[in-house]
Structure formats: C-alpha cells, structure tokens
Image (spheres, grey):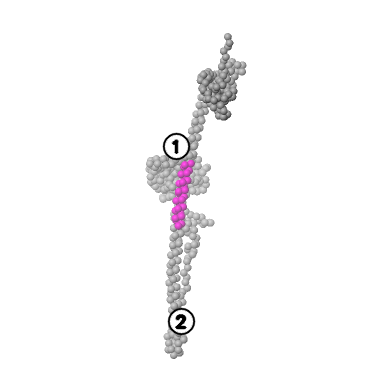
Amino acid sequence: MASKRVFCEEDFSCSVCCDIFKDPVLLPCGHSVCRSCIKQYWNSRDSKECPLCRKRCHKNPPANLALRDLSETFRELRGDPETLCDSHGETMKLFCVDEARLVCVVCRESEKHQNHTFRPVDEMAAQMKIVLNSALEAMKVNLKNVQDSQFNTHRNMNHINRQAQNIRDQITGEFKKLNQFLRDEKTAMLNALREEEQQKTQRLNKTIEKINKEILSLCNTIREIGKELDSQDVHFIKNFETTLRKAQCTQTDPEPSTEVINVAKYIGNLQFRVWKKMQNIIKYTPVVLDPNTAHAQLILSTDLTSVRDSDDQEEESSSQSQQLSDSPERFERCLCVLGSKGFSSGKHSWEVEVENSTFWMLGVATESVRRKEHTVFPSEAWGIGYDNNCLCVRSPSQAYAPLSVATKPQVVRVDVDMDAGEVWFTDPLSGSVIHRFTHYFTEKVFPIFHSLCSLSPLKILPIEPYVCMRNRTYRKP
C-alpha cells in the first residue's frame, strides 16, 4: 500500500509572494496565485499573462475556493510561524534558562541542551511580564514627571510673559510721570522767562517812547533857534532874550538802560536744579520686596514696598487669574516674602510701618532659609512679631517668647550690623529699643516680612534721598 503524501508549505504558497495563499484565483492555464499578487503583476507588465507559463488571460480569473479553504486550514494547523522551532518545526513550549531562548520538546531531548534548566513558556512569560510591568510603571512615573515638568515650564513661561508685561506697563507709567514732570518744569521755566522778557521789554518800550519825545522836543527847539538866527537883525535882537532862554533850557540826559535777562537764573546748574525739584516726586526705599519669593497668598504693592495677606475673595480671584511659577525661591507653606537684596557686610537699616496690622513678623533670614517648611515663621530667621495683643521674638535658638513692651509700636526700625553681628529692633517714634539679637552670620542675610492681616499692610517707609558729590554729601533741603 502506497504511503500518503504529507502536504508541505510549498503546496499552499503563492509563486509570486512566496507566502500562504490569500484569496487565490485560478488562471486559465491552471496555475493559482493570490488575487492581489496577480493584479500587481499585471499592472507592472501592462499585459495579462501567467507569471509562471506566460500564457495570456483574457478574462478576470475566478476565485479558487477549494484552494482558499485548504490554505486557511493549513494555516490554522501550522500555527503562527513565529511560534515554531526553526530546527524542528515544532511549537516552542519551553524556555531554556541557560541559553535564554525558546525551544521545542525535541530541542529539550537533544544533546545540545543536556543538563539545561527549562521552564514552561507561560510560566516564563508571567515572570517576564512582572519585570516588564515594573519597568512600565517606572516609565509611567517618569512620563508623569516629564508631563508635570512640561506643564510647569509652560506655566513658568506664561508667568514670565505676564511679569514682563506688568513690568513694561509700570516702567512706561513711571517714565510717563517723569516725562510729565519734565514737561511741566520746562513749561514753567519758559513761562517765567517769557514773563521776565515781557516785563523788561515793556519797561524798555516806555523808556524808548520817552526818549523819542525828548528828541522831538529838541529838534523843534533847534529848528526855532535856527529860524531866529536867519531873521533880520532888528527882529533877532528883539527876540534874543526869549531865544536864549530856549537855547539854555537843556534836557536831562536819560539814564542808560540796564535791562538784561538773568541768564544764570535759567541756565546755571539747570539739570541739578531740576533734579532737586524731582526729589519731591521721587521716593527711595532702602529695601524693596522680591515678588519671586512671595507666597502666592500675599498681595504686594506695585512699587514692591508693602505686603499684606489676601482675603478670601482676592485669593479666589488671584488663583483663577494667575498661575505663579513653582520656583525654588518661593515660600510655599509660610506666608513670607524676602527683600530683593541681601547683605554680607556693613550696616543697613530700614523702617516698617505696621500700624493696625493684627498679625505680622519681620526681621532677617539667611539665604539658605527653607522656603517649603510648614511653619509660621522660618526657623532660619531672626525677628519680632505681633499676634493680636502680644509682641513676641523669634530666632533659631529661641522659640516664640513674649516681649514686655509698654505700647505696640506703629513703626519698627530694623538695624543690621553685619560686621558686629547685631540686629536691632527699635521704635523710632519713641526711641526705645524693642529687642537686640547678637549673632555672627556666616552667610548672606535678607530682610524678611510675614503678614497674616488683609486689612492693614506692612509698609517699608521711604528715606530722605541724598547724593555724594566728591567729598561732600548733599541732602535734600
């Protein structure tokens, strides 16, 4: 009895794509190819012929249904080619741990894999999925961090754009004030010059008019005397006395004109005099606030010289209208703000108006002060504060301690002597010392302000401006 022939993959392979038939068609010559393959072949040749025997085909070939069914059955029986062993054609159901590769049952019994450790494919896949899931979760966390960084970067960009626009508006407004002041000063000076010019011109016109009258009178007298000189002798002698009196009646010489414009009054030290007047509209504060360090709940004035807590309505509108950048410099838990300039040496002082503020603290803090610490006042700060009816002191070595002060100060003066290592708090209105710290700072310190009152802000008071000219100091009169 003859043995049955076993079908192989070649029996179900298209001669054009060399893959298992997909929607095969039967050509008139008896050969079969995939429908898509024959269409592509004909389009490239511009003629309908069989790819194998070159016999022409004049009709659209019909579908080879029997071959299609057999091809699908063979594909199902064969399984996915990727799951088959390249050496034995069997399904790979084992994983060789020693060689870290998939093998079939025949491979396990071969000499090549003697004494090797094997695991079922599903078991190894489960273990590998656990490892991959762990790596995937780490990637998701990394993706979340990158997305957060992207969001923060866009938010920071928007914040910078808003900051730049606000600064442009404020610069434009300040220069508009200065320009208006200069225009007003120019107008005032030109008006004063014009008024002086008109007054002196009017006086000179009056003098010229008087001189013209005297000239006319003298000309008339001279002409009359000339006529008498030309008259007959008898007539001349009769009128001699009268004519002589006319000739001897001399006019007083006019005083010389001394009317001039006081040039030095207008031109002398013009810029300096304008600058002196400009001091009346210019304010100078020794400390200005740094908005990049301010807690998001604080409200700073446009000139950065006062700070207060926002009320509920302002806080809600502020959170909706602006998204502050998550800067490492910004206080996140403590409602504080630093001064824009730090001190490493020398003496420095500033005065703060506290007035009716019911909860405040102020003083100095080190540059390394922790901005994200959840506390009322940072631990790396030296300052005094007021909580309703109690004045207290706070420092790294001293917790909140009450101070015995007769009356609550309306203004607090802060004096820092970096070289001597001293920080003084005084009441400039009464001249009394509130408290003194002694500490030798090893790093730069910054003024710090803390406010929990929305009604009365902390205001840094301006001081008297001055300018040093060579070895002399000029102060505002």
CA gap between label 1 and label 2 equals 108 Å
Q: Which residue is drawn at the image coordinates 51% and 48% (left, top)? A: 346
Assign a secondary structure to mark 1: loop
Res. 360 visible in picture: no
Quadrant into which the C terminus falls: bottom left
Q: Which residue is mark 2?
A: 222
Place of residue 159 in the rendered image (x, y in percent of width and height, measured from the top left): 46, 42
Identity of the residue furthest to the front in this view: 58
| Badge nearest the viewer, 1 or 2 | 2
State left or right for residue 316 relative to residue 366: left
Query: On screen, 151 above or below 110?
Result: below
Between 46 and 361, the residue placed more toward the observer is: 46
Q: Which residue is mark 1?
A: 374
Between 117 and 473, the residue placed more toward the observer is: 117
Assign a secondary structure to mark 2: helix
Between 414 and 194, the residue placed more toward the observer is: 194
Place of residue 19 in the rendered image (x, y in percent of width and height, measured from the top left): 56, 23
Query: On screen, 276 above or below 68?
Result: below
State left or right for residue 269 relative to residue 389: right
Place of residue 466 in the rendered image (x, y in percent of width and height, measured from the top left): 48, 54
Query: On screen, 360 above or below 210?
Result: above
Q: Which residue is drawn at the image coordinates 49% and 48% (left, top)? A: 348
Q: Amino acid at mark 2?
A: Ile
Identity of the residue furthest to the top in this view: 1
Q: Quarter of the image holding residue 307? A: top left
Q: Which residue is drawn at the image coordinates 50% and 44% (left, top)? A: 445
Between 270 and 17, the residue placed more toward the observer is: 17
Magenta segment: 157-183
Q: Are marks 1 and 2 in contact (CB under 8 Å)?
A: no
Would you say residue 188 sits in the magenta stretch? no
Would you say residue 179 sits in the magenta stretch? yes
